[in-house]
Image (spheres, helix red, strand yellow):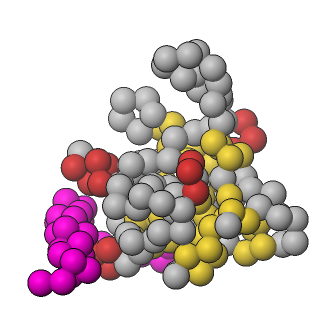
């Protein structure tokens, strides 16, 4: 077995386990619907548990094999889950699913010069974590992505998709 195939097997296993942990629903994605929840501009700041400093994640665009996508901390790709019901105020990804697909926690700042597929907002998850939404869909990272530009979770289980963005000429690209 080549080392490339050997490296691919754990990724395939992780995707299969994630698909099992998360239901096999379908949906329209963040391109459908309107504003939801609390506008991002009024999202409360959160304090870092160790330093007490307020931390706001600055989102940006990253180039991936799936195209130009929205990225969060360290340039990691962000996703939406088609099993989530937009504008419902809840996430369908809990338990083991949320371990594989960690929620993007508020507060965040939208990237300059980048058009999102809808307005940002937030929901409150069980336990009080404020999760960012885009066009009513909760937003997630994928634990399998380890570096900027990776989008290994795109299409996982047929339910997980990158959040595509468009450059409007004001910068915001992370290369």
Looking at the image, residue 32 lies above or below residue 21? below
**From this viewpoint, is residue 117 visible?**
no
- Residue 80 on the magenta segment: no
Q: Position of residue 153 (x, y in %)?
A: 38, 69
Of residues 24 and 110, the one nearer the viewer is 110
Of residues 30 and 147, the one nearer the viewer is 147
Looking at this view, name the residue that lies furthest to the right: 170
Q: The C terminus is located in which quarter?
A: bottom right
Q: Give the residue at x 74% y 56%.
A: 111
**From this viewpoint, is residue 7 visible?**
yes
Q: Position of residue 156 (x, y in %)?
A: 32, 74
Looking at the image, residue 136 lies above or below residue 103? below
- Residue 2 on the magenta segment: yes
Q: Give the residue at x 41% y 39%.
A: 125
Q: Magenta residues, as a range?
A: 1-29
Q: Give the residue at x 34% y 61%.
A: 144
Of residues 156 and 63, the one nearer the viewer is 63
């Amino acid at each position: 077995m080549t080392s490339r195939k050997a490296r691919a097997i754990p990724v395939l296993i992780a995707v299969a386990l994630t698909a099992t942990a998360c239901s096999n629903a379908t949906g329209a994605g963040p391109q459908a619907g309107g504003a939801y929840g609390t506008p991002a501009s009024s999202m409360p700041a959160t304090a870092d548990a160790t330093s007490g400093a307020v931390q706001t994640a600055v989102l940006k665009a990253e180039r991936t094999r799936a195209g130009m996508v929205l990225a969060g901390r360290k340039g990691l790709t962000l996703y939406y889950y088609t099993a989530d019901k937009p504008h419902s105020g809840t996430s369908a990804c809990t338990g083991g699913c949320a371990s594989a697909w960690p929620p993007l926690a508020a507060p965040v700042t939208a990237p300059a010069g980048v058009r999102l597929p809808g307005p940002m907002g937030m929901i409150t998850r069980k336990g009080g974590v404020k999760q960012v939404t885009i066009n009513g869909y909760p937003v997630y990272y994928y634990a399998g992505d380890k570096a900027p530009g990776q989008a290994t979770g795109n299409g996982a289980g047929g339910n997980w998709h990158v959040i595509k963005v468009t450059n409007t000429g004001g910068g915001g690209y992370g290369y």
